[in-house]
Image (cartoon, rainbow, N blue to C red):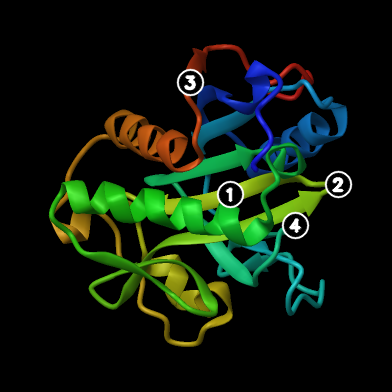
Amino acid sequence: MRPARKTATFAEVVLRTAGSVDYLVAFRAMQDFTNARTPETPDEIWLLEHAPVFTMGLKGRDGTRSHIDGIPLVYTDRGVDMTYHGPGQLMAYLLVDLHRRGWGAKRLVTAMEQAVINLLADYRVRAERRVGAPGVYAAQAKIAALGLRIRQGRSYHGMALNVDMDLAPFSYIDPCGYPGQPVTQLADLGIRRDMPTIGRELAKKLTGELGYTACHQSSDKPPFGLW
């Protein structure tokens, strides 16, 4: 028999919408939040955008490059290989206590992918996941990239959903380590909505797939003096 939940923190999530935030600032804030949280800390979802930046995960890194075609390259501690972030791309960072809910990383990844699949289905766009290649794909191209870090059973980082952005920088790299991987976005699939609308819709899908029964919108920035 599955044990009953003991506190409300299992079922509630705090949603923070932060606008444009420097990648390194957000990265450090996620680490600080994860280090500071207690078993009673509610999970959080952060929605934001970044200025143009390439990020390299723990796979395949050599540490020798600092820029690609004039765009900064940041070495980070999530999984997966290299990807690109920029204006017009919605970042959803998931700070989830997986140990508390008895989940593994695979189950969290599946829930994140399903949230995007469900979002696109609302616009009558068929999307899918691929075995061995985390993310969401539509029209044979990648529309959402995933990368996580799990520390002591708690996740940070999350996913990037291409909304309406300049896709050219993806051609400078092998997206997520896959040479020649096509990349697409909502705008190219006929879905033209502003970022706040897509953010609200994605947050609703994520909270549903993650099983939260309460979502508290907060206008406060994470309390680490970084934002």
Q: Amino acid at mark 3?
A: Cys
**Residue 143: horizontal and vertical position, in percent?**
36, 62
* Rendered residue at 29%/59% (across/down): 185
For marks 2 and 4, give the one nearer the viewer.
2
Q: Residue 176 falls in which quadrant of the image?
A: bottom right
Residue at the disc numbered 2: 152
Q: Residues within 10 Å of mark 1 (few under 14, many from 20)?
A: many
- SS at mark 4 in the image: loop
Q: Amino acid at mark 1?
A: Gly
Residue at the bottom extreme of this rendering: 179
Residue at the disc numbered 3: 215
User: Is residue 80 toward the left or the right of residue 144 in the image?
Assistant: right
User: Is residue 27 toward the left or the right of residue 13 in the image?
Assistant: right
Q: Earlier in the sequence, mark 1 or mark 3?
A: 1
Between residues 131 and 79, which one lies in front from this camera angle? Answer: 131
* Rendered residue at 65%/48% (across/down): 157
Q: Is residue 192 at least partly visible in the picture?
A: yes
- SS at mark 3 in the image: strand
For marks 1 and 3, give the one nearer the viewer.
3
If the image is split into quadrants, where does the N terminus sit? top right
For marks 2 and 1, give the one nearer the viewer.
2
Q: Earlier in the sequence, mark 2 or mark 1?
A: 2
Q: Residues within 10 Å of mark 2 (few under 14, many from 20)?
A: few
Q: Is residue 54 at least partly visible in the picture?
A: no
**Residue 225: horizontal and vertical position, in percent?**
78, 18
